[in-house]
Image (cartoon, rainbow, N blue to C red):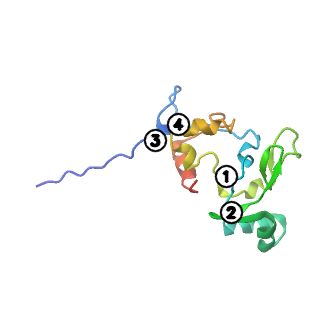
Amino acid sequence: MLRRMSHALPQLEWFDRPDEKGEAGLRFSCTMCGNCCSGPEGYVLVDDAEAAALAKRLGISVREFAERYTRATSAGRSLTERVTEHGNDCVFLDREKMPGKAVCGVYEDRPKQCRTWPFWKSLLHSRRHWERGKAICPGMDRGERFAPEVIRERRGVIDI
């Protein structure tokens, strides 16, 4: 008796479906609004390698970096925040360098959590979740188109 081998195709996700232009994926371009780096109290987790890179960038020891720029949370070490008129800004968010813009003071060495925005599991769960994220981030659905494979790769980097 022959058995049929079923090779199920991977299930398509909502961002795999072509849009009105026939393109799959999602668009994103940072507008330097700072909204993803500010708001209600939150956390930006940093692992040991990220802490070491940031400490090196700042010319301080990892221990000093941890003491000055991180705090303990139930999820791990997080970058600290400072209260501003915009909310709780990341300690590295700079609103003065470029008037009208918010820039990351450690952009090249920013943590994975920041590098993968807005391609987080919580925002990619459904189109509705993505639309809710757009209320915070004006760069979502604008600018460069990211292919579904790239979106999945970035989504898999962290568990948020």
* Residue 35 in view of the camera: yes
Mark closest to the chain's N terminus, 1 or 2: 2
Q: How crowded is the residue under tag 1: few (<14 C-alpha within 10 Å), some, or many (20+)?
A: some
Task: Indicate the position of residue 61 as horizontal and vertical percent values.
Answer: 80, 73
In the rendered structure, which disc, 2 or 3, sits on the residue that comes first in sequence?
A: 3
Q: Do the residues labelled 1 and 2 touch (CB within 8 Å)?
A: no
Residue found at the very far top of the displayed protein: 20
User: Residue visible at 47% across and 35% down?
Assistant: 17
Q: What element carries label 4?
A: helix
Q: Distance between the residues labelled 2 and 4?
A: 28 Å
Q: Is mark 3 on a helix, strand or loop?
A: loop
In contact (CB < 8 Å): disc 4 and disc 3: no
Query: Which mark is on residue 13?
Result: 3
Question: Can you identify the residue that label 1 sits on?
Answer: 115
Residue type marked 2: Val
N-terminal of the pair, mark 2 or mark 4, is 2
Q: Residues within 10 Å of mark 4 (few under 14, many from 20)?
A: few
Task: Characterize the local packing of mark 3: few (<14), some (14-19) or many (20 or more) Cα atoms within 10 angstroms.
Answer: some
Q: Residue at x 74, y 48 (%)?
A: 37
Residue at numbered disc 2: 46
The answer to which of marks 4 and 3 sits earlier in the sequence is 3
Q: Any mark on residue 127, and which?
A: 4
